[in-house]
Amino acid sequence: MTRRAIIALLLAGSLGTGMIACGSDDDAPGGDSSTTVTGPQRSVDNVDVSDPTNVKEKPSVAVPDGKPPKRLEKKDLVPGTGDAAGSDDKITVDYVGLSWSTGQEFDASWDRGDTIDVTLGAGSVIPGWDTGLVGVKKGTRRILVIPPGQAYGAQGSPPAIGANETLVFVIDVRKVTPKA
């Protein structure tokens, strides 16, 4: 097994659900990654998801070479049905998260065989999730590309997420529960 594979396994195993549960007070949009990424500017449209409409299996995700977008970007691969999630609504999701600069997966609910619940706008997740998931419906598969200012910022979330890292998530919405 290569060193890179061992590091990826250690990082994925050490994060558990704590990665997503961490919030951030830094909700400023934009921000550049301090990690040197060369090449052309890229967007959410350049993220490759294998079998993008199969929401019953963990997606394989590839981050493109090049500079990440500077602002939050989102793209629905599968439109959902029913009520759109708004602030204070609870959603139940599966997800895969990757670092843009390395292309390495750092966490995935799929690997634990368990979904997570998120109340949008409650600050229980990174700001990019709180704003980027508004409007999802049950059955939606959404890609989010989240700049550092709406992720973990300058502090990162060591050891898996470096300082000023742009994050990529593929999120499958299993349930939307409107606020009471």
Image (cartoon, grey):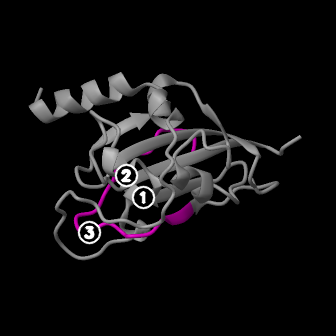
Element under label 1?
A: helix
Q: Earlier in the sequence, mark 3 or mark 2?
A: 3
- Extreme-left residue of the structure: 2
**Location of mark 3 (residue):** 67
36 is higher (above) or lower (below) than 169:
below
Q: Which mark is residue 153?
A: 2
- Label 1 Cα crowd, 10 Å radius (few <14 / some 14-19 / many 20+): many
Question: Measuring 22% from the left and 50% from the top, which residue is drawn there?
Answer: 102
Q: Earlier in the sequence, mark 3 or mark 1?
A: 3
Q: Which residues are magenta?
A: 54-76
- Extreme-right residue of the structure: 180
The amino acid marked with disc number 2 is: Gly
* Residue 173 inside the magenta-drawn segment: no
Report how far apart the C-alphas of labels 3 and 1 lie in the structure: 16 Å
The amino acid marked with disc number 1 is: Gly
Image quadrant occupied by the N terminus = top left
Element under label 3?
A: loop
Report how far apart the C-alphas of labels 3 and 2 lie in the structure: 17 Å
The amino acid marked with disc number 3 is: Lys
Q: Quadrant of residue 146?
A: bottom left
**Location of mark 1 (residue):** 149
Mark 2 and mark 1 in contact? Answer it, CB < 8 Å. Answer: yes
Residue 126, percent from left and from top:
51, 46
Can the viewer see residue 159 in this picture? yes
130 is higher (above) or lower (below) than 106:
below
